[in-house]
Each structure stands twice: as structure tokens, then as C-alpha cells.
Image (cartoon, rainbow, N blue to C red):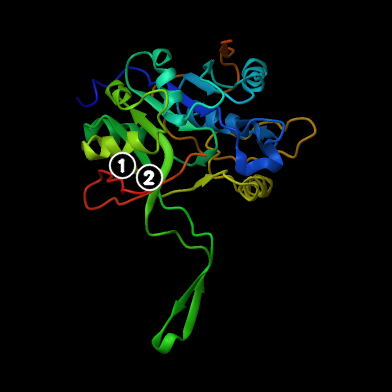
Amino acid sequence: MGPAAQPSEPPPVAILCGGRGTRLRERTGEIPKALVEIGGRPILWHVVRLYAAQGFRRFVLCTGYRREMIEEFAASTAWPEPIALECHDTGRDTPTGGRVRLAADRLDGGAFNVAYADGLADIRFAELLAVHRDGNALATMTVVRPRSQFGVAELGESDRVIGFEEKPPVDQWVNGGFFCLEPGALAYLDESSTLEREPLRRLAADRQLQAYRHTGFWECMDTYKDAVELNDRWARGEAPWVIWGQEEPRSGTRERAPSRSAPTPVAPGATGAGSPPVETEVEGHRPRAAIDVGPSSTADMPETA
């Protein structure tokens, strides 16, 4: 069964923030990966703001490693938008799909969003939800073409080097980490599932995985170098994911967020200063497989990750 009727409000958002960030040891020795700072604020703050600025109001933070630090962050942070933020302990070592499955009863029983806590993009969620609704599939996955890690040499006749291109986009589409799922997709998950492996492959095999192509800015904070580059972007005032207005700097930090025009919210609702306070309820690296997005926009997962 495909998507149900369009709800009156945007569906809730489950954010996976229970991982350890083993490839970010320089930053995550004492804190969870989701609390590594970009521009003086945790990357998790940026992900929540990306959704909240576009009208999303219900968030479930799927915690695990150092969950008490995520809970403290959620309880102590004031948000410009009137959001409801809930922390749900999904276990210290639970894989990504298992975290989604364990949070299912917190997601209102309808369609819901899933995002990783370490990815940033200038994505428009109204477009993602429209593709999901029109695609009539159980799951929709944002796909992106990341930039190559290396510059590319262009060769001419007799292997003469005739030019260079600095870190061009790769040819393949990869998992961008922003999903919309129907309740029926939960049948593909159990507590031991890694979302990016068997569940997505089975959904694709059943023709129940739709792709939403995002061609704008996208970056994932997988390594220390990624964190440095995102902070450098922020310091230069070149942070394309910032679709909310410029805010007052935090004391002791060098905030320099560019002012950008906000997208049309997915659902009507006031945002900005003066909104009601956040409601917070605290309870007790994913691999990215390259995928082939052919003439149709349905994603076919390969055999190997």
C-alpha cells in the first residue's frame, strides 16, 4: 500500500543521533557525534532548524551513545519555532534501522520522516513530500551526487593532459540521508536492522523505494576533515543549508550565518521570535551505497554496499 491521504500538518521527524562517530575521534571522544559543533552549535541543532524552519513541529531524537548529553541539549535549548522535541533511548549499540523500529510508537501512526544527525543540505522538504506522495511507494529516499574526493585530470589524444576539474560531482547517486516513510515500511525493519542495507534493498526489490533527486548543496560530516570544512563554510558566511534568518551570535563564538530567504513552509504556522516555547520530553556512520537512478525515478539498490 502506498501513501495515505496528505495530512493537515507535516509528518513527525525521527532523527538518528545515537551513533558514536568513530571516524570523528578527534571530536567525539567525550561527546556524541550529533553534538559536534558547526559555527558554535551542535550539528543536531542545524538539522532540527532545517526542518523547523520549513514548518515541521514534531521531533523524536533517537538516542543511544552518551544519550544523557543529547537529553541535556534537548532540555536546555530554546528554539525560535514552536516545536515539540522528544528524546527516546533506542540503545547504545542499536543499528540505524533498529532505532527507527524502536521509535515507531512515537511517530503518530502515519507517514514520518527520518534523517541522520550528521547531514546538511539546502533541501526543500515540500518537494520531497510531494515526490513521496506522487510516487505511491512505502519509502522515499533523497539521493545526491557528492563531490569526488580528488581533482580530475582530463585527457586528450595520446593521453595528453588538457585540463583539470577540481573535485567534480561523482556520476553515481548515493543515499542523502533524508527519508519519508509510510507505516508499512516498518515491516521491513527489526531491532537488528541496518537501514541502509537489507531494508532498503528489500524495499527496492519490491519496487517500494522512490528516489527524490536533490541537486543542490549536500554535505555529510563523516570525518574530522568534514567537520573542519563545514566550520570553515560557516565562518566565511557560505552555509547553504541555513534557510532561516540570521540570528544573534552566541557568547564566545564566531557566528556568521548568512541571511537566506526561507522556503515556503510545508504547513502554515508562525515561526521566529515570539513563538511559544519548545515542548521537550526526555525518556529515561551509516554506509552509503551508490545507486542507479535510471530513466524512472525509482531507486534500484545494487547487490553490494
Q: Position of residue 60 (x, y in %)?
A: 49, 19
Q: Position of residue 185 (x, y in %)?
A: 30, 26
Give the residue type that dot 1 points to: Ala
**Distance between mark 2 and mark 1 Cα atoms:** 6 Å
Q: Secondary structure at mark 2?
A: strand
Q: Dividing the image into 4 quarters, which one contains the N terminus? A: top left
Q: Position of residue 224 (x, y in %)?
A: 65, 47
Q: Mark 2 highlights which residue?
A: 143
Residue in view at x 40 percent, y 43 percent: 175
Q: Mark 1 highlights which residue?
A: 211
Label 1 near label 2: C-beta < 8 Å? yes
Q: Position of residue 130 (x, y in %)?
A: 29, 33
Q: Residue furthest right?
A: 252
Is residue 94 placed above or below 258 in the rendered structure? above
Query: Which of the pair 186/156 is nearer the observer?
Result: 186
Q: Secondary structure at mark 1?
A: strand
Residue in view at x 67 percent, y 41 percent: 25
